[in-house]
Image (cartoon, grey):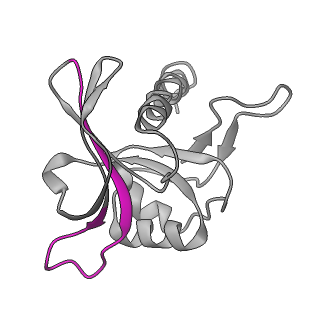
């Protein structure tokens, strides 16, 4: 498991190995043993890292993150609206709010900013983040940077066989 710095400074390695894992693994389980930098970079993560205990830990440590959430896994209570629905680039922002995650049965209820945007494809993009002061446009644009990471990941798999 690794972190890739999208806009690394010249002369700085953009890759940091977080954990070495053999065989199949669960992203959320492996991340429980990884220490992320507090008040450091904004970590862009896919749906495999959505776990309330991780979110609670990152929030308490000051870890900055934008995390994609599976819509079918989503249960929340709106605390307050951050901004109104509107078009942003080729997306339509459906919801931008501070929420308490989890249903009645959940043991933890992390409080995050939740954005739900309809993509041009018709699919909903659901993001949970600690970035309260950023505009919704900035959060969405930042998550779009994950494509750099995906391309690098494809290179590691195809060219290097990892």
> On the picture, is 10 further left or further right than 149?
right
- State the residue in front, 35 or 154: 35
Q: Residue 118: x percent and y percent?
A: 21, 30
Residue at the spot 40% in from the left edge and 48% down from the top edge: 67
Front one among 3 and 39: 39
Residue 93 visible, this orientation: no
Give the image quarter of residue 140. Answer: top left
- Give the magenta-colored segment's residue range: 99-120
Q: What's the residue at 14%, 24% (across, down)?
A: 122
Query: On the picture, is 66 further left or further right than 20?
Result: left
Residue 12 located within the stretch drawn in magenta? no
User: Which quarter of the picture shows residue 64?
Assistant: bottom right
The residue located at (17%, 56%) in the rendering is 73
- Residue at 48%, 54% (x, y): give it: 132
Which is nearer the eye, 128 or 134?
A: 134
Residue 96 screen position, x and y as percent: 31, 46
Q: Residue furthest front?
A: 84
Is residue 122 found left or right of 142 in the rendered image? Answer: left
Residue 149 in percent (x, y) is at: 52, 30
**Spot occupied by residue 160 in the image (x, y as percentages of width and height):** 58, 24
Residue 113 seen by the camera: yes
Q: Is residue 62 above or below residue 136?
A: below
Residue that lies at the very extreme toward the right in this rendered image:
11
């Amino acid at each position: 498991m690794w972190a890739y710095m999208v806009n690394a400074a010249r002369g700085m390695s953009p890759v940091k190995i977080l954990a070495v894992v053999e065989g199949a693994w669960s992203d959320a389980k492996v991340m429980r043993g990884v220490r992320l930098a507090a008040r450091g970079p904004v970590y862009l993560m896919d749906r495999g890292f959505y776990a309330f205990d991780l979110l609670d830990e990152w929030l308490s440590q000051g870890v900055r993150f934008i995390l994609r959430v599976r819509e079918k896994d989503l249960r929340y209570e709106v605390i307050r609206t951050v901004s109104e629905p509107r078009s942003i680039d080729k997306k339509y922002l459906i919801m931008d709010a501070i929420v308490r995650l989890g249903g009645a049965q959940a043991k933890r209820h992390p409080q995050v900013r939740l954005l739900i945007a309809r993509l041009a494809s018709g699919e909903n993009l659901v993001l949970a983040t600690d970035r309260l002061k950023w505009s919704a446009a900035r959060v969405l644009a930042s998550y779009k940077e994950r494509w750099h990471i995906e391309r690098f990941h494809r290179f590691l798999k195809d060219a290097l066989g990892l």
